[in-house]
Image (tube, grey):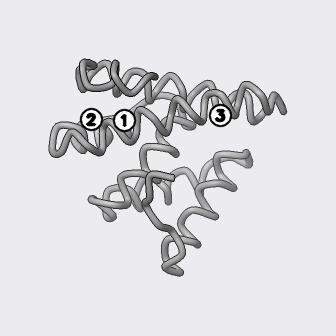
Amino acid sequence: MKRESVKQTSVPELAATYAEAAALHGQASVEGAHRVANAQYKKLMAAWRALRNRGEDGRAALTELLQASNPHVRLWAASHVLEFAPLLAEAELERLAHGPPSVVRLDAEMTLREWRAGNLKFTED
């Protein structure tokens, strides 16, 4: 996602890009396809930065993704929603952390642990 095109992209389009990249990143991570995972991570972070900069509309779009059918999307969305709606985000992370054994479960457990320890920072790097 190029910087100049981000400004012209609607919030729903950004949310769709975020969700697609989160799902593909998760699948690639499970499969050990690190190049694909890294490329999707870059798209995911670009979409997150753009949504974050859209104020309330962007926050609402991220919050809606907590209801996505894909657990990788819910995991990423919950991680980013912690910044502005921690109770909602923690509830979803708890659900994921109590799910079946998986990478999503482990990531949710670690995210909660680091969040509660005060180690998570929301930067654009």
Q: Which mark is residue 26?
A: 3
Q: Is residue 22 above or below residue 75?
A: above
Secondary structure found at label 3: helix
Does the CB distance between marks 2 and 1 fall below 8 Å? yes
Cα distance, mark 3 to mark 1? 15 Å
Residue 3 as seen in the image, left or right of residue 9: right
Residue sitting nearer the eye, 52 or 68: 52
Q: Which mark is residue 65?
A: 1
Q: Residue at x 77, y 34 (%)?
A: 30
The three-letter code of the residue at mark 2 reads Ala
Q: Residue at x 24, y 38 (%)?
A: 58
Residue indicated by mark 2: 61
- Could you classify mark 2 by the number of other residues whose Cα lies within 10 Å: few (under 14), some (14-19), or many (20 or more)? many
Spot occupied by residue 11 in the image (x, y as percentages of width and height): 24, 26
Secondary structure found at label 2: helix
Residue sitting nearer the eye, 80 or 9: 9
Mark closer to the chain start, 3 or 1: 3
**Which of the 4 quarters of the picture holds residue 102?**
top right
The three-letter code of the residue at mark 3 reads Gly
Q: Residue at x 36, y 35 (%)?
A: 65
